[in-house]
Image (spheres, rainbow, N blue to C red):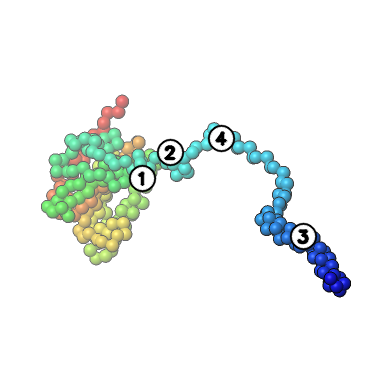
Amino acid sequence: MEPKLLVRLFSQKRNVDAMAPMKTYILLLLLTAPILSCEEPIIEAPIVSALPEPEPEPENPNSNPTSLLENTREKIDHDSKHEKKTEPDPDWILFSDFRAPKPLTWSWTTPSSNMRIANYAIPGDEPADSCELVIKQFAVDEGKDLPANIERWKSHFRSSAGGPVQPRVTSAVIANMPATIIRINGEYMGLGTSWHRYNHTMLIVLIEYEKGNIYLRLIGPEETLISQQAQWDSFLDSIQLIQIN
């Protein structure tokens, strides 16, 4: 073999031998790179000192789990305050410490206010012509200013000419007690309502009683009151004080 050819072959072998370690290193890098990329980096969490849990508040033995509305209802029993009244006796008209036989044609009606202790309807020739009897009792220190009350009752009426009415006031004795009877006639305007009732009469009887004056008010068409005048007078004459033990 020629000397030049041997030199060339020897040089190529040295190059191959020099590249072998490099190829091995590159191969190792390619094989380990995916493994390294799949591992998640480890991040150390910051150290936080634990806070002590708050202690539970002591229970109040006087606390009430009910709502404010329920607490209010316990103090003010609205249901019993506005309890529907029923007729105490079908044969007698009972009010305060008094009673009187009930006329056959008079009927009990449920009072529209707790201020009323009794309420009756007195029929006329037509249903619209009926009268209403309302019975109340004032507190001991109320209802004694008769002139002021008369002026207030007058304000519910006006004459046919549109002017003020003139009440007729008389004294009486009912159940052996002093009483005052007021009669007012005219156009009844009610308590500021938009409707008016013509030729209406209001009869008011105030009985002076030590436990609180008794107030009886009969109102309706003049014709009905005239037809019921005898029963009305009989009712007033029969009022008696119930014996109180």
Between disc 4 and disc 1, whose residue precedes?
A: 4
Quadrant of the snapshot with the C terminus: top left
Residue 25 in the image: above or below residue 234: below
Pick whichever, 15 or 64, lies toward us: 15
CA distance separating discs 3 and 2: 92 Å
- Res. 176 in view: no
Quadrant of the snapshot with the N terminus: bottom right
Q: Which residue is mark 2?
A: 74
- Res. 123 in view: yes
Q: Which residue is mark 3?
A: 25
Looking at the picture, how far across and down is residue 162, in whole percent?
Answer: 26, 65
Q: Quadrant of residue 177?
A: top left
The mark found on residue 143 in the picture is: 1
Looking at the picture, how far across and down is residue 41, in whole percent?
Answer: 70, 54
Secondary structure beneath label 3: helix
Looking at the picture, which amino acid does disc 1 mark?
Answer: Gly
Q: Which residue is mark 4?
A: 60
Looking at the picture, how far across and down is residue 129, in whole percent?
Answer: 16, 54
Looking at the picture, how far across and down is residue 36, in whole percent?
Answer: 70, 56
Secondary structure beneath label 1: loop
Between disc 2 and disc 4, whose residue precedes?
A: 4
Q: Quadrant of residue 178?
A: top left
Between circles 4 and 3, the one closer to the viewer is 3
Left or right position of 119 against 230: right
CA distance separating discs 3 and 1: 119 Å
